[in-house]
Amino acid sequence: MTGLTRYPSNDALAQHLAALPDLKTLFAQDPKRGERFSLDAAGLTLDYSKNHLTEETLALLAKLAREAQLDEKVAAMFAGQPINHTEGRAVLHTALRGSVAESVSVDGAKVRDEVQATLARMEAFVASLFKGEWQGFGGEAITDVVSIGIGGSFLGPKIVTEALKPYWQHKVNVHFVANIDGAALGEKLAKLNPGTTLFITASKSFGTQETLTNSESARDWLKAAGASFADLAKHFVAVTANVAKAEAFGIHADNCFPMWDWVGGRYSLWSAIGLPIALAVGMDNFRALLAGAHEMDKHFQSAPFAANMPKLLALIGICYINYKGATSHALLPYDHGLRALPGYVQQLDMESNGKGCHQDGSAIDHLTGPVIWGAEGTNGQHAFHQLLHQGKQLIPADFILPLESHYKLGRHHAMLASNCFAQSQALMQGKSLAEAKMELAGLDQDVIDALAPHKVMPGNRPSNTLLMDKVSPQTLGALIALYEHKVLVQGILWDLNSFDQWGVELGKVLGNAVLARLEDADQPLDLDASTNALVARYRRHQKNINA
Ligand code: F6P
């Protein structure tokens, strides 16, 4: 592992990390290690003691961060500088939760004013639906809202809405449709009444194939039920930066909530893209979500490195990725409501830091963003934890647990928490051959010798544990902002642009060429041999079913 050779302190860090004792020894050496390496911020507690680090590690990581000009680059983001330079854009999602100075403006418009005006519009919209004032084409109040969007226009609102189920106001039912697979929309429409259903087309670009196609099919469904073109205004709103395209689709400009170039899709749940959240939990709770994220923003900007949660998580992650070759990172929420969090952080992290060139275009010669994956505890324990414990890869993990459940059911929560704590303990301490043999005492020696190696667990496997009192709008806001900032910090250390996503473009372009050949059998099969054969097979099947 060469580490991050661009930084002067790289070699010292690499040598230091290679010489660290294992976790069991570190814990034996310092009975206060658990307290020493934990911290509180914005309603979250992070225990990072089960990581390969000492005070000296933290000092070296702080040095690396200084060499990367981390603080200056973080300040540049909050100041509204165009740090997304490949798209010529500022990165100001933090403004959506009131975390940038009043003076910050983009293209002559004060960002804070735009945010406040949009929140006011959202407030009025939510109120009109809650009061039953927004009516469909038959004069009935809207009962169901379907948010149509994908990627960042879907994942954030979906995970937050799901996680905050105990806060639902039950005034309107909120649904999500993302996939182009007709099953996604079809299953929803089958259960809905056109006269009382409102669609939100959530697309920053208003050019995303999945979202446009689903919206068109929803529009056809309304028309088939008797809605006129003019009636569509009662059944469609948009959240977009491209009002002209929304209008061309048939959504009135008055029904368009703004998105801005300075908010990336995967950072947009705090904007009007978060309307489904507000419709589910109410504006007060939506504002509390913003307030929780704002607390994390303040902490991120002001806490010194050794007490800075996002910076620590980021730099600790870099130790495993760049100095120990970890290529993936598991997110293990021990909370049913947070079960979609790994999928959300997947986009946030992998679309931001899954990059291969530095800011100046030169090739990166080390690992960058890891594969993010995971599932809710304890389900994962009965599925993939085996590999975490005994597999050959190093997979750092984040365990996430609320100390209190919204559902008071017997001993469930204590059991959930015990599983969470015991898993990180098992990963850390492992089981030696001698311990495995002791466990088998009483059996024949040849059986012990044969079985014991299978029970050995190497241990020394790192993890973080994140706790919060309860999953609430505030703590959830802080948790998501924590991961946003972790991603930013890693991107800065790797000197890449975390805010573009050019890698998704080629597949879209090729997809259009393939679609043309799937839908028109007269088009030549002039693609590569594999794709030609797949298209031909698809065409044969279509011919059979249409015969
Ligand atoms: O294709 C990737 C992407 O551009 C994401 O970055 C984005 O969140 C998603 O598609 C949806 O984009 P839009 O909101 O413009 O429809």
Image (cartoon, rainbow, N blue to C red):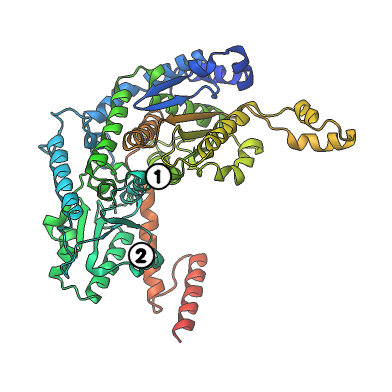
Contact (Cβ within 8 Å) of mark 2 with mark 1: no
- Asked whether, in this view, residue 242 is left or right of residue 398, the answer is left
Q: Nearer the viewer, mark 2 or mark 1?
A: 2
Mark pair 2, 1: CA separation: 22 Å
Q: 29 or 547: which is nearer to us?
A: 29
Dot placed on the residue nearer the N-terminal end, 2 or 1: 2
Tell me which residue sits at (48%, 73%) in the image. Answer: 538
Q: Residues within 10 Å of mark 2 (few under 14, many from 20)?
A: few
What is the tally of numbered marks visible in this picture? 2
Q: Residue 309 at x, y = what percent? A: 40, 25
- Residue reaching furthest front? 410
Q: Describe the element under mark 2 as helix, strand or loop.
A: helix
Q: Quadrant of the N terminus?
A: top right
Q: Which residue is mark 2?
A: 188
> How many residues crowd around disc 1 within 10 Å: few (fewer than 14), some, or many (20 or more)?
many
Q: Secondary structure at mark 1?
A: helix
Task: Depth check: give the residue in front, 54 or 39.
Answer: 39
The percent position of residue 129, horizontal first and vertical second, equals 19, 55
Q: Is residue 30 left or right of residue 38?
A: right
Residue 482 is drawn in which quadrant?
top left
Q: Which amino acid type corresponds to the residue marked 2 in the rendered image?
A: Lys
Quick check: 414 above or below 236?
Answer: above
> Foreground: 222 or 216?
222
Q: Is residue 348 above or below residue 505?
A: above
Residue at the (60%, 47%) spot, across then down: 383
Amino acid on which disc 1 is placed:
Tyr
The residue beneath circle 1 is: 344
Q: Position of residue 114 (x, y in %)?
A: 14, 40
Q: Is residue 116 visible?
A: yes
Q: Is residue 100 left or right of residue 427?
A: left
Q: In the image, residue 495 lies at what x, y percent?
A: 38, 31
Residue at disc 1, CB closer than 8 Å to ligand 1: no
